[in-house]
Image (cartoon, helix red, strand yellow):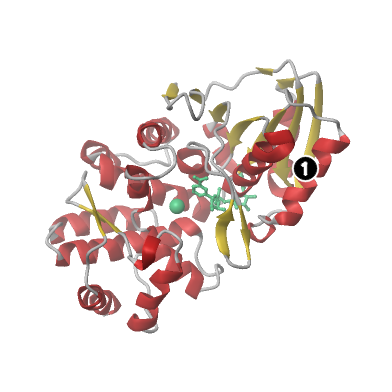
Amino acid sequence: MQVNVVLNQTISKDYVVYIDELEKLVLDTKVMVVTNTTVADLHLQAFLARIQAKELHTVILPDGEMYKNFDSLHQILNACFEHRLDRKSLLIAFGGGVIGDMTGFAASIYQRGIGFIQVPTTLLSQVDASVGGKTGINNSYGKNLIGTFWQPNAVYCESAFLKTLPKREFAAGVAEIIKMAVTFDAEFFTWLEQHDLHQNEHLKVAIQKSVMTKANVVSQDETEQGIRAVLNYGHTFAHVIENQTNYSTYLHGEAVAIGIVMANTLACKLRLMQEDDAQRIKSLLEKYALPTTYAIPSVEAFYEAFYLDKKSANAKIKFILAKGIGGFEMRNDLSREVVLEALREMHA
Ligand SMILES: NC(=O)c1ccc[n+]([C@@H]2O[C@H](COP(=O)([O-])OP(=O)(O)OC[C@H]3O[C@@H](n4cnc5c(N)ncnc54)[C@H](O)[C@@H]3O)[C@@H](O)[C@H]2O)c1
Ligand SMILES: [Zn+2]
């Protein structure tokens, strides 16, 4: 299966997302594969055997979001210099979203930008992070605050890699799939209710559907001036939860699941969504054992924390809300009182 990501040619070139089509990668350049210790132990040898290149190098970084930082970026860039990669050389990101974001960032700044290929190995990175060209690292001020828009030359999603993924990581990816279905595709949502993604043939369909949705959104709005922000449905709440729990209690996708339920409570309050649709979404999240509740320690503190999120431009909080199932509405006009009321309801 293939999905084309069509972009505004003045910024970036189009590219193809291949789903379960990676047999052999033949590249007439120097190539450096960037991965982490976990993915290297499980899959690197088999993956390298499929690559044919002028020279093939690897960088193996430590595993974890806490290593999505300048040190790791330095390691990637230093390896590029050490192996004398030139402007035609390619980086390959072989791992989850952390490796994908860092490798893309390194590719975007090495000698003013070289090409890179995404080979995402988590469900979250296959359906979301690897497509769309957002790259970056974290620093002490927050997540992904340093980075670039730099599109990959190609993306290869292989469902076979997902067989070794821990259960929670799998479910975290499903949360992002559900996110896209709720906001953009009612039919896909109904299909998700009827099919179990633990079965590989269904999983492949869901990956393809999600990639198509993401590709469609990114082609309309590569640099997030408008509709791309809808992909942050559930995220305004999730970022606060992740922050309040020191990024250690929940995986990102798990926090997104809770955030989706919270956003829906607000949407119901504003009569954008009916209770039974909110219940359908909650049930689907629960089917994958995703968390859907969070005991808010203080609703006022939770509200104030929205302002820490970089996505709240000009101190106006932009809420991405689902309008029923299959639609969305962006609202930056909500009063503090109405949001606090909804937060109190969520807390109950
Ligand atoms: N660029 C974007 O548009 C975008 C979108 C969403 C998320 N992100 C970023 O992506 C990151 C989250 O990505 P993630 O959820 O993939 O996390 P991750 O990269 O940390 O991977 C999760 C865990 O799974 C392990 N893993 C990876 N592949 C595996 C496999 N096949 N089998 C077993 N274990 C495997 C990893 O080593 C890691 O321990 C965050 O840093 C987030 O900011 C970026
Ligand atoms: Zn997300």
Does the image show residue 19?
no
Q: Position of residue 70 (x, y in %)?
A: 72, 55
Q: Is residue 99 left or right of residue 78?
A: left
Residue at the far right in the pictured view: 82
Disc 1 crowd rating (10 Å Cα; few below 14, some 14-19, many 20+) is some
Q: Is residue 117 left or right of residue 324?
A: right
Q: Quadrant of the C terminus?
A: bottom left
Residue depicted at x 84% and y 37%: 81
Q: Work out whether residue 168 or residue 211 is closer to the camera in this orientation and state it.
A: 211
User: Amino acid under label 1?
Assistant: Leu
Question: Picture coordinates of residue 270 (x, y %)?
Answer: 14, 64
130 up-or-down from 337: above or below: above
Between 219 and 255, the residue placed more toward the observer is 219
Please tell me which residue is depicted at 23% across the width and 76% down the height of the picture. 345
* Nearer-the-camera pick, 227 or 28: 227
Residue pictured at 42% horizontal, 58% vertical: 311
Residue 73, position as x, y percentages in the image:
72, 49
Report the front residue among 205 and 132.
Answer: 132
Query: Disc 1 marks which residue?
Result: 77
In the image, residue 132 above or below residue 340:
above
